[in-house]
Image: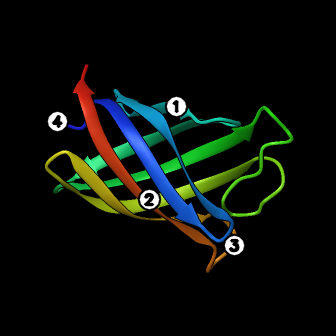
C-alpha cells in the first residue's frame, strides 16, 4: 500500500536535499526547508504517477533545479517494496529533472 509517510531525497543541478511527503487518498502533501508540496497521485500495476505543485514559502531558500518561485513536477516511477525511485521532470521544461528516491517511513 502506498498510503503513508515517505522520506523524500532528491538531487538536481544545484545540489541535493530532502523532505517528507504524506500519500493519502490520491493526494500528496509535504515539504522541506523552504517549499511545500501539494499534488495528486495514481497507482497502477506498481507504477506511481504524480503531479506535484512545489510552492516556495522562504524566498531565500534556493531549490535544486535553480528555478525561482513556484513550479510543478511530474513523475512516473515503479514502487518496489518501500521504495519509489525515478526522475521528477519540471512541467513545461523538457530536459529539466531531478533524481528522486522516496522511502516509506510508516503506514497511516
Q: Quadrant of residue 33?
A: top right
Q: Nearer the viewer, residue 72 or 101?
A: 101
CA gap, disc 3 to disc 1? 23 Å
Residue pointed to by mark 1: 30
Label 1 crowd bin: few (<14), some (14–19), many (20+), radius 10 Å: many
Per the rendering, the mark at residue 1 is 4
Residue pointed to by mark 2: 100
Residue pointed to by mark 3: 93
Camera-side mark, 4 or 2: 2
- Which numbered disc, 3 or 2, marks the residue that appears first in the sequence? 3
- Which numbered disc, 1 or 4, marks the residue that appears first in the sequence? 4
Camera-side mark, 1 or 4: 1
CA gap, disc 4 to disc 3? 31 Å
CA gap, disc 4 to disc 2? 19 Å
Residue 91 in picture, x, y percent from top left: 64, 63
Q: Nearer the viewer, residue 34 or 87?
A: 34
The residue at 70%/53% (across/down) is 63
Q: Do the CB atoms of the residues marked 4 and 3 lie less than 8 Å apart? A: no
Label 4 crowd bin: few (<14), some (14–19), many (20+), radius 10 Å: few
**What number of labels is visible?**
4
- Which numbered disc, 4 or 2, marks the residue that appears first in the sequence? 4
- Which numbered disc, 2 or 1, marks the residue that appears first in the sequence? 1
Label 3 crowd bin: few (<14), some (14–19), many (20+), radius 10 Å: few
CA gap, disc 3 to disc 2? 17 Å
Its colouring scheme is rainbow
Q: Quadrant of residue 1?
A: top left
Residue 64 in picture, x, y percent from top left: 66, 59
Amino acid at each position: 500500500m502506498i498510503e503513508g509517510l515517505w522520506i523524500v531525497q532528491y538531487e538536481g543541478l544545484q545540489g541535493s536535499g530532502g523532505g517528507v511527503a504524506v500519500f493519502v487518498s490520491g493526494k500528496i502533501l509535504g515539504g522541506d526547508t523552504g517549499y511545500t508540496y501539494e499534488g495528486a497521485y495514481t497507482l497502477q500495476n506498481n507504477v506511481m504517477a504524480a503531479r506535484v505543485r512545489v510552492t516556495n514559502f522562504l524566498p531565500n531558500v534556493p531549490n535544486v533545479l535553480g528555478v525561482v518561485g513556484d513550479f510543478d513536477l511530474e513523475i512516473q516511477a515503479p514502487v518496489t517494496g518501500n521504495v519509489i525511485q525515478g526522475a521528477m521532470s519540471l512541467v513545461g521544461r523538457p530536459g529539466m529533472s531531478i533524481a528522486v528516491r522516496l522511502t516509506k517511513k510508516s503506514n497511516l
